[in-house]
Amino acid sequence: MPLVSMRQLLDEAAAGGYGVGAFNVNNMEQIQAVFEAAQETRSPVIVQASRGARSYTNDRFLIHLMTAAVELYPDVPVSLHQDHGNSPETCLSAIDQGFTSVMMEGSLMDDGKTPSDFEYNVAVTREVVEKAHAKGVTVEGELGTLGGIEDGVGSGEVHLTDPDQAVEFVERTGIDALAVAIGTSHGAYKFTKPPDGEVLAMHLIQQIHERLPDTHLVMHGSSSVPQDLVEKINRFGGKIAPTWGVPVEEIQLGIRHGVRKINVDTDARLAMTSAIREVFVEHPEEFDPRSYLKPAREAMKAVYKQRMEQFGQAGHAGDYEPLTLEQMRERYAAVAA
Ligand code: G3H
Ligand code: 13P
Ligand code: ZN
């Protein structure tokens, strides 16, 4: 099956009352692990690439790896999504490469750091929506900013999403999906203790969903930072300070209130690192990369499978016939007319 529109994946998820994991990839093993997990659990899935991932793979490796995966796993409906597009140019270049969905992160300026103002966010997001929808491609916008800075991306400041402003933002931009800031952050260091309602503003999701029942909500920074993986990394010589992620039950609460796309990167990074560290420590004589990359791939696959079950996407791969981007383009044009 060709790459499909993220809008269709999320519309189907809304109709079925489940969420879809959006997993960041940078290399072949991650892509293989996502597709193996999706095939075994019969899940639709979103594969996403950050700007860093696109530069690491030089785009062409990424696109060809995805093309191979789509060919080898024809029963898995999958969208390829630009994660954290910092400018219309980044989003448009992703579309040119064959991405079927893009995020325009207009809540930050194009340096990916400085918080922008509302009018800037509306203007750049609207521009991307017009150009992307003309090609049947999905657009995710963002209102509010997450905490934390990963690889120089992010403002480090938390600005929670204002539900009333969210309504105006969606109306003026025409986005398909809205990333909300509810107190999560990227990376492994989200919370210094298990988060409660004070730090994780799940009530905002409920309020935004009540006002925007037809807009798909996106949770960034949704890794759960499994304690067993942190412990394993440290047991095999790593140095991860005590830290907590987003409990899966909170994500499931979000899914009951309109969260359809759940972004997970860190959990797979932890799984991969823990498996590689184990081989290095237990088998110091090994130097064939396959001896550690195979267990790394298996460890990531286990995380992906678990999340697919927990988010509810498992079992839904065969529910629908994917629309082509041309059919999506016609749908957008008909709504605009
Ligand atoms: O949004 C952040 C993702 O975890 C991607 O991170 O920019 O290091 O690839 P990255
Ligand atoms: P984590 O760092 O929690 O995995 O979040 C990933 C993310 O939001 C990618 O956009
Ligand atoms: Zn993110």
Image: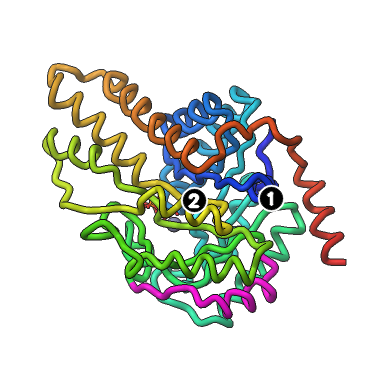
Residue 32 visible somewhere in the drawing? yes
Of the numbered discs 1 and 2, the one sitting upstream in the chain is: 1
Residue drawn at the location 58% of the way across and 27% of the way down? 68
**Residue 213 screen position, x and y as percent:** 66, 64
Classify residue 187 by image quadrant.
bottom left
Give the residues drawn in magenta, as a range.
157-175
Amino acid type, callout 2:
Ile
**Residue 44 screen position, x and y as percent:** 60, 37
| Colour setup of the view | rainbow
Q: Quadrant of ligand 3?
A: bottom left
Residue drawn at the location 51% of the way across and 38% of the way down? 62
Instruction: Residue 173: say if magenta.
Output: yes
Question: Which residue is the site of mark 1?
Answer: 11
Residue 58 visible somewhere in the drawing? no
Circle 1/circle 2 CB separation < 8 Å: no
Q: Quadrant of the N terminus?
A: top right
Q: Quadrant of the C terminus?
A: bottom right
Label 2 sits on a secondary structure element that is strand
Which of 299 and 305 lies nearest the eye of the viewer?
305
The image's mark for residue 262 is: 2
**Residue 221 screen position, x and y as percent:** 40, 56
**Residue 97 as seen in the image, left or right of residue 327:** left
Work out how far the residue at label 1 is from the one at label 2, CA to CA, in angstroms: 14 Å
Residue drawn at the location 48% of the way across and 57% of the way down? 219
